[in-house]
Image (spheres, rainbow, N blue to C red):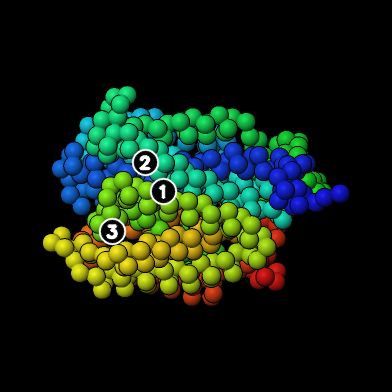
Amino acid sequence: MTTDNEGLLRGEPEGPTGSALFVSIAAALGGFLFGYDTAVINGTTGALERQWGIGSVETGIVVSSALLGCAVGAWFAGSLANRIGRPKVMMLAAIVFFVTSLGSALATGPVDLTIWRIIGGFAIGAASVIAPAYIAEISPAHLRGRLGSLQQFAIVLGIFGALIVNFGIQASAGGASGEVPWGGTAWRWMFAAAAIPAFVYFMFSLNIPESPRYLVAKQQLDRAREVLLKYVGGNVDHKIIEIQGTLSSDHPPRISDVRGPRLGLLPIVWVGIFLSMFQQFVGINVIFYYSTSLWQSVGFSENDAFLTSVINSIVNIAGTILAIYLVDRIGRKKLLLSGSAIMFVALGTMAVIFASSPVDAENNPVLSDGAGVTALIAANVFVFGFAFTWGPVVWVLLGEMFPNRIRASALGVAAAAQWISNWLITVTFPELAQTGLFLAYGLYSLFALISFVFVWKMVRETKGIELEDMESLERGELAT
């Protein structure tokens, strides 16, 4: 006789555990689109600058433009999901991303590429909100951390997939600006390839059930009972009563529910917002948006820079696998604290290396062989430190930390803050880099240090706590 937990670890998807694992994977595919879009632009920036003659400011706008759309999509996704359901929002996001991938591939200039990426961002932002909320709502409490981590695992697989595709396409064309053997410019095929995972996401979204908490909110109790029995298990009738108790407000969930006494928002919502902000302010997406051009600027060849970006992605995947193993064992808070410490050291090391190296005529640091190796190791330590802590754990917390009555709306606000923070970091990096890479990485190191203090003081442990008990935890009625 084995427990569901043991079965999952050995890859035996039996009973509620196996069913919840399948639908969690399906929902997390939205994260794959998120990751793919994050990294696909990485391989195109140099080619876009050469083809269209744009500078660092324009490049920053094109690269970061999708993030503005993501913020809008994240903001409205929770309310939309409360009206039409979680899977339908996933399907809509897949359709939008499919169309905008092809539109980006056919762009004739930076303006229309920016427009296509903003529209595509609506889909990515919506998927980024719905996946963690849906996974949290359909997962057994003792597995919620690991299943919630699948969102981040899908993100890093999407990053890896995009980098592998970019590497293969540019290799076949002799560079991102070259012509591929089957016709067309390499960078255009990098964008077009994103339509494939969008189609897969749509097909999976057709085959997953509605969230039991959405069904209870809509008074579809028989369907909710069926979903809970198949995917969550336990005393189903008792869970329905608990859900009804946490959804007892006299109006449908809406953004106004997150309003409170702390500068207009509930304290728990501010915690979610700052978790989202710090996840981005450590500069992780600089690695995945700009790493190819960054490594070229410090002396790597184009092919070696692409390969180095792939290595970063492999490290990212390894760290996320470790997070899935640890998150329900040692808890969310300890992982965040350890990640902040590791990132502070790694980012500080990079800042020191870039500050102490001579620069060329374009103010790019010229690294010696030893400094280059050290910087590369520090970058991978940073990625690993993020990947097994802040990357997945923030998504797990955002999916589970809010009370039921405000979960979708609060998650939308926090995710919107995350996308805006991502945009700020992404759009400012080219100018910071021109001033000096030491300045950029020094700032990111400082944010890593501040994030440690924030988690230590403000974040409560949620490991093993039922979603219906999160409001009691917020009021301090549960021990952490």
* Residue 34 in picture, x, y percent from top left: 45, 44
Quadrant of res 371: bottom left
Q: What's under tag 2, amino acid-wise?
A: Phe
**Residue under the image location 61 percent in, 55 percent down:** 324
Quadrant of res 52: top left
Report the front residue among 100 and 367: 367
- Please name the residue that numbered disc 3 is placed on: 429
For marks 1 and 2 on the same chain, the one whose residue lies earlier in the sequence = 2
* Residue 349 in picture, x, y percent from top left: 37, 71
* Residue 322 in picture, x, y percent from top left: 59, 58
> The residue tagged with tag 3: helix, strand or loop?
helix
Task: Tell me: 142 left or right of 414.
Answer: right
**Seen from this angle, which residue lies furthest left?**
361
**Seen from this angle, which residue lies furthest top?**
182
Distance, label 1 to label 3, CA atoms, is 21 Å
Quadrant of res 16: top right
Above/below status of 5 relative to 443: above
Task: Tell me: 285 left or right of 338.
Answer: left
Q: Which mark is residue 297?
A: none
For marks 1 and 3 on the same chain, the one whose residue lies earlier in the sequence = 1
Task: Tell me: 364 left or right of 143.
Answer: left
Q: What's under tag 3, amino acid-wise?
A: Phe
- Please name the residue that numbered disc 2 is placed on: 167
